[in-house]
Every structure is written in C-alpha cells, then in structure tokens.
Image: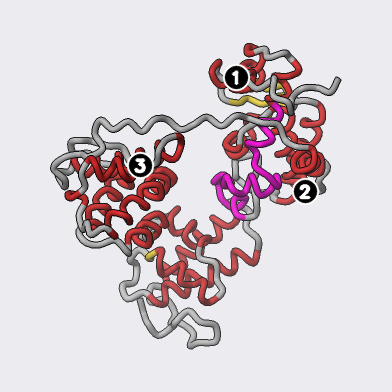
C-alpha cells in the first residue's frame, strides 16, 4: 500500500485511483450493494469514499484489497466492515486478518516456555483448521478451543513453573496431580488435557499419552430452579411491557414458550405463520400475548428497515444491512437477563402445574425424555411448592 496517507483525519489526501475504469466499476458495485441491502445515505457515501482511498493507496492497481488495510480506515473514522461486505461479494477481498481466537491463543501461551508453546500451537492449528491426514479430525469451534485451553492452562502453567519445558516430559502422575478431586472441575480440566495430549500423540509430537485410561468423570448436571420474585420475575414482567419491541417480543417467546437463545437467533421470517411458529420440525401455537408482541416487533422492523434483505426475525442496526443473524450475547443483553433462566422457570412452572407430566413437557417444549425428567425431578423443591 502507498504509505503517503496514514489514515488520520487532516493528513494529506490520498492519490486518485490509477485505474479509473476499475474505480468506476467498484463504485457502481458499491451503489448496487447499498441499494440492495437498504443502506443509509451516510453509510453509502462513506463506503464510496473508503473505496477511492484504498484504490489510491494500491501499489498494484487491480489487485485484491487486503482486509487488514480496510480495517485501518477506522483510524480515520471510517467504518471498514461495509467495504469488506462489498469487496467480498464481488471477489476483490483478500482476507488476511488473524482470527480472534488465534490472537487470544498467542496471548494465553506467551508466558509458557519453548518448546511447550510450539507444541500447543500444533494442537491449536489442528483444532482450528481440522486435519485431512490420518488421524483425521474435524475442526472445532472457537468456543470449544477457548473452553479446553482455559481449563488446561492452570496445569500447563504449573508444570512450567516446576521446570518442565516440553509436554514430552509430562507423565501420568503429573496429570493425576493436576486434576481436581471431582465434579465438573475435574471433568473440564481432564477434557482440556486429554484433547491436547491426544492430538499431539496423533501428530507424533509426544511418544505416549499421559491422559490415557484416566477417568475424569462427567460434568455435574445443574438442577433447574425457578426465578425468584425479587431478582427474576419482576424483571421478566418489566421486559414484557418494555417500550423496546424487540425486547418485549423476545421475552414473550421465552416466557410463554420456553424458546432457547439459539431459537431466537435462528428464527426466520418464513418460520412465522401468523398464529404459529415452525421450530425444530415442530409447530408452536403462539399464545395471544406473544402473537401481539411479535406482531408489534415485525411492524417496527418493517418500518425501521423497510429494504432489509435479512431473513431472520430479529435484527439490529448491524445485521439489518447484512444477511447474518444477531449474536447470542445480543439476545441476552436485549432481554436483560439470561434467556436460559427464563426458559427454565417456564418449564418448571409447567412441570408443577401438570404434576410432572413428562409427555406434556416433551410435546410443549421439544424436550427429550431425560431432559424433561430434569424438571419433573424438581417439583418437590420447596421453592416450587404452592403455599397452603
């Protein structure tokens, strides 16, 4: 990239694009993309400005534009994501950004000695990208990678403090000494260590797997409990009457029909049929209050983003100009509490009202029989007993 413009406001203006034909084509593509996705005039003008800046900075006119260069525009107060959306759609984007989970991994292992850090990097690569060579492994999600390393890291750090510099030096006795006594902590640490050593053994980085035949147990099942009046039910009632139509609709779907967080994220417009939802190959007949609040949200959505092509029921200013779903944290933040807590309270209420009818819980909420029994097993809890 041309270094004459440093992405700061007030600095020297960038050069004009050398390839004006390409510039014209990209600006037309930007216009078409903005119109198609219902962008505001401000977003459209900003994206066109950014494209001209990036083309003017190119050393090789016509080459794909690097995503990292686009994101540098933030230093000039220009949003980079809209430009990435445009260039990705027309095949002019070079994705060179390091995934956030990779940056996180490097920060986590920075204090570990070599070659232990490099050995963990092999594990990270296989987890992130998968492997087509034997032993084959499918890639894992960033959530899984973070979970396993976070729980294994205290043991890894302890071994490094004891003078171990390589995972080849770790024996069965070291693993046993590092494992918690039992319950969920033992299961989580064991899962993380087993993942690391199994992959390294498969890649022939270590000679033996010290976690082999060590039992770490299963995570403890958390007993579902009802919401308290002061800390939960009052908040749910407040959310149901919220002036924010998204918050009210989301809360209603959970409080009446016990939808999960991922149900709200994945719910599409085609799944809504006036009085019912098509959900996980089952039909949910909407209660009248839910139907009313969901209709209010859909009307607001159509007014606020009349040209959006996003197929999901719930959108926000970030996703309305794209076709992606909202994030899981956004759902919880909008509702004002964990969706799972409201869901559990709703199912527990049904379990109490039906005297522990497992079949009814399965039919209403799409639970498996063991899943429904988690709730029916708690109906004798003091917090669920009705006052006499």
Q: Position of residue 236 (x, y in %)?
A: 77, 40
Q: Is residue 176 left or right of residue 335?
A: left
* Mark closer to the chain start, 3 or 2: 3
* Residue at 41% from the left image edge and 43% from the top image edge: 144
Label 2: how many Cα within 10 Å (few below 14, some 14–19, many 20+): some
Foreground: 278 or 191? 191
Q: Can residue 299 be seen in this view?
A: no
Q: Is residue 122 left or right of residue 381?
A: left
Q: Tell me the distance, in whole angstroms, between the alpha carbons under discs 3 and 2.
A: 47 Å
Which numbered disc covers residue 244?
2
Q: In this view, does 59 lie to the left or right of 328?
A: left
Is 143 within the magenta?
Answer: no
Which numbered disc covers residue 179?
3
* Residue at 74% from the left image edge and 39% from the top image edge: 249
SS label for mark 3: loop
* Residue at 23% from the left image edge and 56% from the top image edge: 116
SS label for mark 2: loop
Quadrant of the image for the N terminus?
bottom left
Q: Nearer the viewer, mark 1 or mark 3?
A: 3
Is 320 within the magenta?
Answer: yes
**Circle 1 residue:** 372
Q: Marks 3 and 1: in contact by CB < 8 Å? A: no
Q: Give the range drawn in magenta.
A: 318-346
Q: Tell me the distance, in whole angstroms, between the alpha carbons under discs 1 and 2.
A: 33 Å
């Amino acid at each position: 990239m041309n270094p004459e413009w440093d992405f700061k406001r007030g600095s020297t203006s960038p050069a004009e694009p050398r390839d004006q034909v390409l510039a014209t084509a990209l600006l037309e593509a930007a216009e078409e993309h903005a119109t198609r996705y219902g962008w505001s005039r401000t977003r459209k003008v900003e994206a066109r400005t950014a494209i001209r800046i990036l083309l003017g900075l190119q050393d090789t006119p016509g080459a794909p534009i690097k995503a990292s260069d686009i994101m540098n525009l933030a230093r000039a107060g220009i949003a980079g994501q809209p430009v990435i959306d445009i260039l990705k759609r027309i095949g002019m984007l070079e994705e060179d950004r390091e995934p956030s989970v990779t940056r996180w991994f490097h920060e986590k292992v920075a204090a570990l000695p070599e070659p232990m850090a490099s050995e963990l990097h092999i594990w990270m690569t296989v987890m992130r990208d998968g492997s087509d060579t034997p032993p084959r492994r499918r890639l894992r999600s960033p959530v899984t990678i973070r979970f396993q390393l976070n729980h294994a890291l205290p043991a890894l750090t302890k071994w490094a403090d004891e003078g171990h510099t390589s995972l080849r030096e770790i024996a069965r006795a070291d693993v046993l000494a590092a494992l918690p006594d039992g319950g969920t902590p033992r299961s989580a640490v064991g899962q993380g260590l087993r993942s690391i050593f199994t992959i390294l053994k498969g890649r022939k980085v270590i000679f033996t797997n010290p976690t082999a035949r060590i039992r770490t147990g299963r995570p403890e099942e958390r007993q579902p409990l009802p919401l308290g009046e002061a800390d939960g039910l009052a908040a749910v009632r407040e959310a149901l009457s919220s002036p924010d139509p998204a918050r009210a609709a989301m809360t209603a779907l959970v409080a009446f029909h016990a939808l999960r967080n991922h149900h709200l994220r994945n719910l599409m417009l085609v799944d809504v049929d006036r009085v019912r939802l098509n959900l996980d190959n089952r039909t949910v007949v909407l209660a009248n209050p839910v139907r009313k609040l969901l209709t209010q949200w859909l009307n607001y959505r159509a007014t606020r983003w009349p040209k959006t092509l996003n197929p999901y029921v719930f959108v926000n200013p970030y996703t309305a100009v794209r076709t992606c779903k909202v994030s899981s944290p956004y759902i919880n933040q909008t509702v004002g509490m964990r969706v799972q807590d409201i869901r559990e309270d709703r199912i527990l209420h049904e379990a109490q009202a039906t005297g522990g009818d497992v079949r009814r819980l399965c039919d209403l909420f799409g639970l498996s029989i063991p899943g429904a029994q988690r709730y029916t097993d708690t109906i004798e809890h003091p917090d669920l007993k009705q006052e006499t």
